[in-house]
Image (tube, helix red, strand yellow):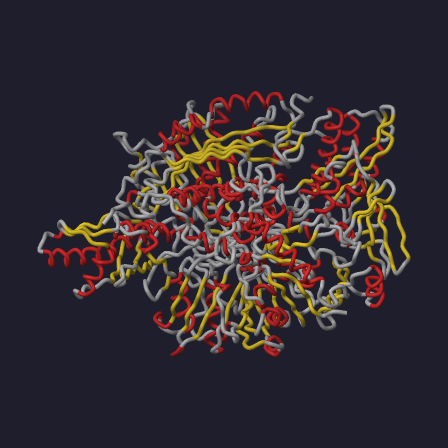
Amino acid sequence: MSTRRIAGDIQTSQHHDSATKHVCGEAVYVDDIAVPANCLTVLIGQSSNAHARITRLNLSAVAAAPGVVAVMSAADIPGVNDCGPVIHDDPVFASDEVCYVGQSVFAVAAVNMAAARAAITLADIDYEPLPAILTIDAAMAAGSYLGPPSEMIKGDSKAALAAATHQLKGRLYAGGQEHFYLEGQAALAIPGEDGDIQLFCSSQHPSEVQHKTAEMLGIANHAVTVETRRMGGAFGGKESQGNLPAMTAALAAYLTGQPAKTIYDRDDDFMLTGKRHDCRIDYHVGFDDEGHVLAVEFTQALRCGMSWDLSAGIAARAMCHADNAYDIPHMKINNYCCLTHTQSNTAFRGFGGPQGMLGIERVMDEVAHYLRLDPLQVRQRNFYPEKTARHHGVTPYGQKIEDCVIQPIVDELVKTSDYVTRRADIAAFNSANQYVKRGIALTPVKFGISFNTTFLNQAGSLIHVYNDGSVHLNHGGTEMGQGLNIKIAQIVAHEFQIDVENVKITPTTTGKVPNTSATAASSGTDLNGMAAMRAARTIKQRISIFLADQYQIDQAEVVFVDGQVLVGGDRMSFADAVKRAYLGRVSLSATGFYATPKLNWDKDHMYGRPFYYFVYGAAVSEVIVDLLTGENRLVRADLLHDVGKSLNPAIDLGQIEGGFLQGVGWLTTEELVWDSKGRLKTHAPSTYKIPACSDRPAEWRVAFYADGENSEDTIHKSKAVGEPPLMLAISSWLALSDALAGINGAAYPALDAPATPERMLMTANRLGARFV
Amino acid sequence: MRDEIRFVLNGRIQRVAGCAGDITLLQWLREQAHLRGTKEGCAEGDCGACTVTMARPNGDGRLDYRPVNACILFLGMIDGAAIRTVEGLADPDGNLHPVQTAMIKADASQCGFCTPGFIMSFYAAWQNGNGLAPDDIDNTLAGNLCRCTGYRPIVAAAATLDCARNSDIGNSDMAHDGAMLEALKNMPDSAADLCLGDPPCRFLAPVTRISFAEAYAENSEAIIVGGATDVGLWVTKQHRKLGCMIWTGGVAGFEQIDDDGDMLRINPAVTHQQLLQKIADDAPEIAELLRRFGALQVRSSGTVCGNIANASPIGDLPPVLIAIGSKIELSTGNKSRRFDLENFFLDYAKQDRRAGEFVSAVLMPRGPHPYLRCYKISKRFDQDISAVMLAANIRVRDGVIDHVRLAFGGMAGIPKRAGTAEARLVGKPLDVEHFRDAAAALPDDFTPLSDMRGSAEYRMLSAQNLLIKYGLELVSGKTMRLAGDGLTTGLEGWE
């Protein structure tokens, strides 16, 4: 028997497992599932008011409309009228009061979409308007918060500020961001025996959909099964926001006994669902002549919208990333979760981390501008000590930073990006050009990995090995395009030492792995990969024990390698070994479970070790700006990012590139506009502009940090990759700011985000670039 | 009159009778044909997830494969065409098409939802033999949004494809589609007028000018449909119930650009893409503006006359047509009248179009237009609608500006010339100071509004600056643009 290395091993580039299906149109998304002819279409009737009391809700005309099978409102819910992920403040259907334009008030289940569309217009609803708070400024002025503000304290910032040589104060606004997954929210519910419900969902969190659906229907969790094969993008937008479509479909199926599906079209998706939190950050910084930041106080205000959703966790992460990569002796971070009468903002790649980082990166930039230093110098002077240093820094929340590699990453990036020369070239260019300015910025990222909420850091898997040696893999993570399934299949193939094609990737279902956490916080592979590895090891060990017993050898002499099993001096194929074990009545099915070690978090005091480890990276962006129009381009981006020992470099590269450009979109062209009545005016791609092909950097160099290796005992020493690269895009925003700083005699630009052409032009105008 | 549509779908002839007048191609594909590889991402022609190709003979013995947005294309509009969807690319043995293989090899899909649309944009380029080279790719893909990849691997996939040397697979598709289209032509009534759907919503596709005129005379309230890149949205976005529609695209001769003295006569069904190709050499300024008009899918469907007729205040084409002195022709029955296009737009949503009249042609002075410059300001360079648009044109005689047209979009309820600013330039030498002076006068011409595309202050300031930029560019002979191919920053050192 010849030997060769297995195909699809860990630490090799493998295509996405669905790549062929993607390019052939054969990958099935929820709306593509063939349904029985009696499947109903569910459409949600939305509030037209930002804040109002419902004084009358008469849906009789809706019910009587042609093709309508059921009309549903709060009164039709047998159990709990709530779809919120953490706290019960998010009704499936508003009953007494509406709290944003677009809020679900009722739903209709009809024979098709046309009938449903026609029917919902017949609703007879009277509103008594109430005062609406729409913006952060209004909420802060009115003291409109979801809960008491949070505080995180390190040292004595007040005293340190007072003692500092220099002080600056400032304020930053950053806009929100629509997820704009290409596949809108989607769910299909099929009623079963005994009142059971089977759901097919585009959800990052099938277990939560299961639990919330059961709670709504007043039935046990075991009566609801939720399956997710894949999502057409999610980015956090399907962590909690998938609940409502799934629950309305389930309710329709429950009430009518017919299959039902809820598919949001693009406009409904924009109007109904939460987005990234926009924020206002006030800062007060004290520093010395060399740019050592001695103390910072931040007041972060996040616009949470009308309910909690996941905002408490997002706020905690925003606070936990207010230091980014900087060891600042004294910090105080206050965070306000603003209650506004707008969509309930939710998870979005980075989960508050990006907002937290924006604050400190703005501070570093402004300190450098004030001192007339290169911002890179100021940053480098403030980094946390490297992991090899004798003393380690401690974050404002009390976690020791023992794995810091930001210095070698930045040092290498400075060289490979030719930062110093380019910065000089740009200065020369800017002094010779009145109408066009260039800018450059290097920013670091340090991002904490693990859910802040400790109990969420658990995962399960289920593996069957069939008697022909083929392997059925199931785990609690969901596939949203990030390549989770192929990575975990590689991990399992590696354990069994079989070709990855022998490992069948199967849909995530609550029926196989229960009580899962959302696939979120970049943790999908860390958690589920480890759980899958453990399940595979359990089965491997049983086979080993069996074969060792048969051959009367030590268990250690049974070795799985290169597609074969070595048993003492003998060798057999994996399939043969499995066959023998089967005939020997050995269980070939196992679960695996993993709980991240070392974690603790005291959310009342914002203190502990919330993160297992940190991911590091840095980026240099260069831009060019037309001062007559505010138009701008990202002409070059150099990214150097630590993925540890990559499980699949091709997949990880995709996460870095995609995350970066998504971050660029957030900070440049993606602008959400609500009118004075609280109506979102940008609710489709015609008005909301995510990056197009030509918006990618003209020159784009992406590399992995070559010495990357996780200090902790993660799955094959890899590091999570989903969220951190998004924050590399902060460099593009500060490069735009740098270009504006190139205006002759300009004050500090204090550029807000998103830096649309309008914001760039108006800021340039404020800074003195006036031509009329 | 025929009530059955016939087309070729993935190489096979399809005959569809009894469909609704306002059903879209995407609805039909997904719900009737059970081809669910083609996705709905936005239902407004802005994301490209629903891209399919529509091929018709181009007159040179080849088929012209146009990428189109199936979400806003009425089914009647594909009569007599060959449609390919993502399911129709692999060969009968299941071997993938080169564009599919290239995407896999480049790791160019993540969630995969946008991928069929990208595949079909690639396929259109492949079949047409251009569009995948590094200089072309941004333009080819401007109408396809991807939220996962950052586009780099998709562009890398394109770079591995040499579409100029089309493979056998591509050629055989064209030969096969061509043969099937011939077979369609030979069916009975193939040249008959088409009438789909039951009243009130009918889709009429007359095939001659005479039958078009008759249909409009009989249905004077009918909506004239060109490429449905606007009317399609009335159905998919506004959920309006439409009455009778009359499509210009089936009328013989309506698809042509004719010579009309020193003008080009643009007939009702001429698409933006057709015009772009026609004028690319003579009027590159207009071609570049057209290139930023929607994206390839929208330009391949949307018509010039339709863009004029719908009179959107943010239409990007009227300003430039006004700036070069274009005329409009309106017809009813066999009567027609011509007048300056700028006089067509009376007020917001109000045009000088009488009952029964339709836009039968736009007459556009031929290039070159040496002093014409077009500036489009939008949040995003590609596939966006302008916040402000300036098309500026002057004539210089003996060193003096003697004619000026400064046509703005986005500054008023209609595309409008800046009369006061123009007057400040007439009789002046070509000097930047006078453009600054004209810019200072713009507040006398316009009181722009604030909306989600831009505030009033921004619109005014950028409009003023554009006028200065125009002066700077003319005087220096250089251009300073960040949009389009590469960067031109030719005003270095300009004071």
Q: Is residue B171 left or right of residue A204?
A: right
Q: Is residue B128 left or right of residue A568?
A: right
Q: Is residue B47 left or right of residue A356?
A: right
Residue drawn at (32%, 56%) of the image: A502
State the residue in front, B358 or A684: B358
Is residue A613 visible in this depiction of the protein?
A: yes
State the residue in front, A127 or B57: B57
- Count of marks, rendered view: 0
Q: Quadrant of residue A607?
A: top left
Q: Is residue A410 left or right of residue B330?
A: left
Q: Position of residue A47 (x, y in %)?
A: 58, 64
What residue occupies the far left of the structure in this picture? Answer: A552
Q: Quadrant of the C terminus of chain A?
A: top right
Residue drawn at (75%, 59%) of the image: B250
Q: Quadrant of residue A407?
A: top left
Residue drawn at (68%, 45%) of the image: B293
State the residue in front, B262 or B328: B262
Q: Position of residue A178 (x, y in %)?
A: 53, 51
| Looking at the image, residue A557 lies above or below residue A746 | below
